[in-house]
Amino acid sequence: MKDISNYIGGTLVAPVNGQYIDNITPATGKVYSRIPDSGEADVAQAIAAAEAAFPIWSAMSAKERSNILLRISEGIAKRMDELAQAESVDNGKPLKLAMTVDIPRARDNFAFFATAILHDENAMHDMGKSGFNYTKRKPLGVVGCISPWNLPLYLFSWKIAPALAAGNCVVAKPSEVTPYTAFLLSEICIEAGLPDGVLNIVHGYGHTAGQAIVAHPATKAISFTGGTATGKTIAGIAAQQFKKTSLELGGKNANIIFADANFDDALRTSVKSSFANQGQICLCGSRILVHKSIYEKFRDAFVEKVKQLRVGPPNLDSTQVGAVVSEAHRDKIESYIALAKEEGGTVLCGGHRVTPEGEYANGYYLAPTVIEGLPAQCRTNQEEIFGPVVTIMPFETDEEAIALANGTEYGLAFSVWTQNLNRAHLVADALDVGIVWINCWLVRDLRTPFGGTKASGMGREGGFYALDFFTEPKNICIALPQQ
Ligand code: TXE
């Protein structure tokens, strides 16, 4: 059994208190490694190391920082198989998904921000004969990055890469549920020659290690992805210290299918947007809204396709839906399925556990579940379930579809399926949401603003939005001599 280490001041170290947390693989329900149960003392060491490294790292040229970050990207590429395997074991996601999405994207995150800093520009505001202003953007100092378990290395690197590229030093905490690839990243950073203390990775629980990062006066900004309730706690602590926060929180996304949609494309993609990563992506479309005139046809075809999804051990090539991330999370998802029934919903397919054979029999497998007949305002249609469960319901008019889509406290990412150009643009404009995908889902351009409205979060990640977040603008005003 492997005990993984914290990465502090450039070295791999044990937690100060010597305590560890069991790390369970959801595919079998068995403990397979142990994670440091870090606390304030470990975070204090990490922050001290980051503070010591900041003058060196921030003084490097963009080119020098870029070269080091590119080496990290290459290090991820070299260890692609090992990282994908670790991600799948830690999270329960199909190995194929980790190989094609998670780890390639972590590699790309580093490469993207490593090169973005070579192509940026700063503002100059001209006052004509009176003078001009130029704006410098300075790194903030030590920043905290806290990430969740659903896309572990993908989201961890999505925060760390822009923070480092902008010249900050980082204290980061991956989810205690899926820590392994973050640990492997520490090894990659050491091999890549990242100067000591520039990135520090502290493992442990959210309420201890995570909260210590947020509460420490030396962290100038917190970038967080995770649950909305946690986001609220973090925002409350950070606000007391006027700390910048970027919060990417939950979603209850609508997938709106109009009668004039390309039926086959909408159908195929809806299966993916509902159940990719066992439905554990904040961008998954968990409420499918279908125009009344095609409702029965779409519903029946959708359920037919969902029934064919193969649920099973993540390491099998044939598996399309793996295990959900933990026993507690499986229980939470099951409680929502029970609630949906109480609220009057009909389970069209799924709604039960799946038990593979042999060593996988105690893993956390759930059949992809489709529920209809629920009112829009019920809890099942309002709260984030974050599992392989979707609801489906009909609508009659464009206005009704928009109202249904906007009718939750969340506003992260909606999909709109129509071949009518005017409808596509008008509906997209009316949706109170951070991201709209028209005739597609999860098509990503890393330059675009990423984030949500309302309870889905605050601020935007991606491209120069992230680099802006991790820097402080300083305006310098030059007055020209007046005649
Ligand atoms: O997330 P948490 P959980 C949603 C989803 C899920 C629910 C809870 O609905 O069921 O959130 O998931 C750290 N101070 N999403 O409990 O707790 C924690 O250690 C500082 C949506 O796993 O928010 C982990 O590293 N940090 C989502 C990270 O926060 C704290 C992805 C996320 O954990 C902390 C995951 C604290 N007080 C869950 N408490 C998305 N938007 O992608 C916890 N953490």
Image (tube, rainbow, N blue to C red):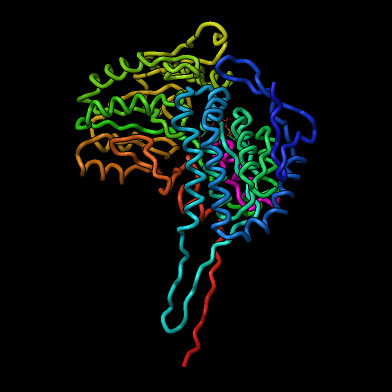
Image coords of residue 399 (percent x, y)? 26, 38
Between 471 and 58, the one lying in front of the other is 58
Badge count: 0
For this orientation, the residue located farthest to the bottom is 483
Between 174 and 423, the one lying in front of the other is 174
Image coords of residue 101 (percent x, y)? 45, 32
Image coords of residue 254 (percent x, y)? 36, 33
Image quadrant, ligand 1? top right
Residue at the image point whose x is 52% and y is 38% from the top: 155
In which quadrant will I find the N terminus? Answer: top right
Verify whether residue 170 appears in magenta: no
For this orientation, the residue located farthest to the top is 358
For this orientation, the residue located farthest to the right is 17
Image coords of residue 134 (percent x, y)? 50, 71
Location of residue 115 with respect to 76 vertically, above or below: below
Location of residue 197 with respect to 278 vertically, above or below: below
**Location of residue 159 by image quarter:** top right
For the question of whether residue 446 can be seen, the reply is yes
Left or right, residue 22 beside residue 306? right
**Location of residue 416 by image quarter:** top left
Residue at the image point whose x is 72% and y is 45% from the top: 9
Location of residue 282 with respect to 446 vertically, above or below: above
Between 455 and 59, the one lying in front of the other is 59
Verify whether residue 237 appears in magenta: yes
Magenta residue span: 217-238
